[in-house]
Image (spheres, rainbow, N blue to C red):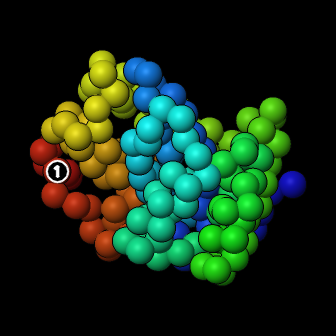
Amino acid sequence: MTDPKPTKGFQSVSADFFHHAGKTFLAYADRLFGWPIVVSCNREVTSRTLVCSLREIFSSIGEPNVLRSDGGPQFTAHHTRDFLVRWGVRHVLSSPHYPQSNGHAESAVKLVKRLLQKTSVAGNTDSDGFARGILEIRNTPRVDGRSSAQILYGHPVRAIRPRT
């Protein structure tokens, strides 16, 4: 079963943790147009780390109606559940042992992990290469011919390469 398609940006999002270069990252992506956000975390991620990351994201772009994630311990912890209830976010869990059921988050993880591999051997998101790469991802036209940036802002954001 699939969720109904969201009608607004950041109304429905996916999140998942992944590891690269000995570090743990949180990948967070909008389900309507795929705008990815990456948060570098400590190696051992707790529910408190997750809540701090989500609070920062929510305060920047707004809280979603729905957050979809796997059933990992950080996402199912009491602390995380309480936080999401306080912010009015419905949490939809997929199986942690069946990653395909959270395919949107898995796609975001794959995309961001590939970018990290190309731009930073040490897994550093604080670099020009990573920042330009994530900008290009957000500016790349999708199947419908519009990029995530065009959908969100109404126009592409300025990038290194000129757009036609």
> Which picture quadrant has residue 117?
top left
Residue at image mark 1: 159
Residue 126 is situated, as x and y percent measured from the top left of the image, at 23, 40
Residue 72 is situated, as x and y percent measured from the top left of the image, at 72, 43
Please report the residue visible at 77 percent of the width from the left and 47 percent of the height from the top. 71
User: Can residue 9 be seen at all in this image of the molecule?
Assistant: no
Please report the residue visible at 68 percent of the width from the left and 52 percent of the height from the top. 75
Q: Characterize the local packing of mark 1: few (<14), some (14-19) or many (20 or more) Cα atoms within 10 angstroms.
A: few
Please report the residue visible at 37 percent of the width from the left and 71 percent of the height from the top. 60
Which element carries disc 1, helix, strand or loop? loop
Give above or below for 135 relative to 11: above
> Which picture quadrant has residue 134?
top left
Q: Nearer the viewer, residue 120 or 9?
A: 120
User: Can residue 1 be seen at all in this image of the molecule?
Assistant: yes
**As drawn, is 139 to the left or to the right of 56?**
left
Please report the residue visible at 44 percent of the width from the left and 22 percent of the height from the top. 22
**As drawn, is 107 to the left or to the right of 91?**
left
Dot 1 amino acid type = Ala
Residue 98 is situated, as x and y percent measured from the top left of the image, at 81, 34
